[in-house]
Image (cartoon, rainbow, N blue to C red):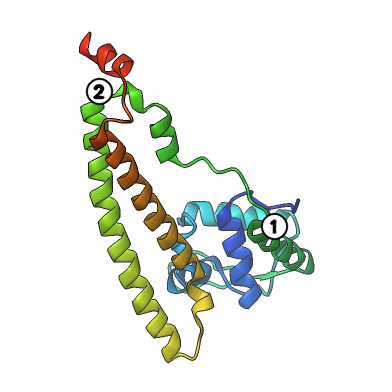
């Protein structure tokens, strides 16, 4: 198991940025946004500086050159990835891609407690989710088309939008599953007398 610095995806993104070239935190933030990594990690300056400090303390990155200052802006420190950080980055990405891991999506938690709602309310919530998922599929398909065209214009392949394709596939699968569940509700094969009776007494 790699030592994952600050133990969050933002640390991975920082290491990936610095594997490209030395950068100061503001440049890291800009690079993540330009490369659309902010769709995979939660990015804000407070967390970014904390992660940078943690990675530096652990020896995964190091400051290069003196801090610079422009006008009234805070000093900027430029960092580079170390050999230790590079090895950790490689191991971390390999592990993430290779090893399935338990994840805890909020939707699954809601489904675990679906019977807290009356059956009609549960169906209404699922139909609302279905509509939202349809819109999400359309949005993600359009984004992938645009991104793929932009990459091709720069001579780059679709490998750079694999994450977008994965997320689209997950949303499409979820939409198909939600529709199947709604079909079971419509057919009357999913809810039961105990669930209906419980809420009828309230």
Specify the quadrant of the image occupied by residue 170.
bottom left
Residue position marked by numbered label 2 in the rendering: 118
Residue 38, image x, y percentages: 45, 62
Viewer can see residue 9: yes
Residue 55, image x, y percentages: 67, 57
Q: Earlier in the sequence, mark 1 or mark 2?
A: 1
Using a 10 Å C-alpha cutoff, classify the residue at mark 2 as few (fewer than 14 neighbours), some (14 to 19) or many (20 or more). some
Determine the residue positioned at 25% across, 35% down.
187
Determine the residue positioned at 64% across, 57% down.
96
Q: Is residue 201 above or below residue 178?
A: above
Between residue 87 and residue 176, name the one nearer to us.
176
Front tag of 1 and 2: 2
Q: Is residue 30 above or below residue 102?
A: below
Viewer can see residue 21: no
Determine the residue positioned at 40% across, 40% down.
107
Between residue 81 and residue 124, name the one nearer to us.
124
Q: Is residue 39 above or below residue 178?
A: below
Callout 2 secondary element: loop
Specify the quadrant of the image occupied by residue 147.
bottom left
Q: CA distance from mark 1 to mark 2?
A: 42 Å
Q: Which mark is residue 95?
A: 1
Between residue 201 and residue 91, name the one nearer to us.
201
Residue 7, image x, y percentages: 63, 48
Callout 1 secondary element: helix
Between residue 176 and residue 36, name the one nearer to us.
176
Give the total of numbered labels: 2
Task: Give left or right: position of 139 versus 148.
Answer: left
Task: Give left or right: position of 107 versus 179.
Answer: right
Determine the residue positioned at 43% across, 29% down.
112
């Amino acid at each position: 198991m790699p030592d994952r610095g600050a133990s969050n995806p933002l640390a991975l993104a920082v290491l990936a940025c610095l594997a490209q070239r030395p950068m100061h935190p503001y440049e890291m933030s800009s690079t993540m946004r330009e490369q659309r990594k902010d769709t995979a990690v939660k990015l804000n300056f407070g967390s970014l500086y904390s992660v940078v400090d943690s990675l530096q303390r652990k020896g995964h990155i190091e400051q290069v050159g003196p801090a610079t200052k422009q006008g009234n802006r805070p000093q900027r420190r430029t960092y580079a990835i170390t050999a230790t950080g590079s090895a950790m980055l490689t191991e971390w990405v390999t592990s993430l891609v290779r090893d399935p891991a338990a994840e805890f999506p909020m939707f699954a938690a809601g489904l675990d407690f679906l019977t807290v709602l009356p059956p009609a309310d549960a169906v209404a919530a699922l139909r609302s989710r279905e509509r939202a998922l349809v819109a999400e599929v359309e949005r993600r398909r359009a984004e992938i088309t645009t991104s793929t065209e932009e990459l091709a214009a720069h001579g780059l392949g679709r490998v750079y939008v694999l994450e977008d394709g994965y997320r689209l596939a997950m949303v499409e699968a979820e939409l198909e599953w939600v529709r199947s569940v709604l079909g079971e509700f419509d057919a009357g094969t999913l809810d039961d007398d105990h669930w209906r009776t419980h809420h009828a007494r309230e």
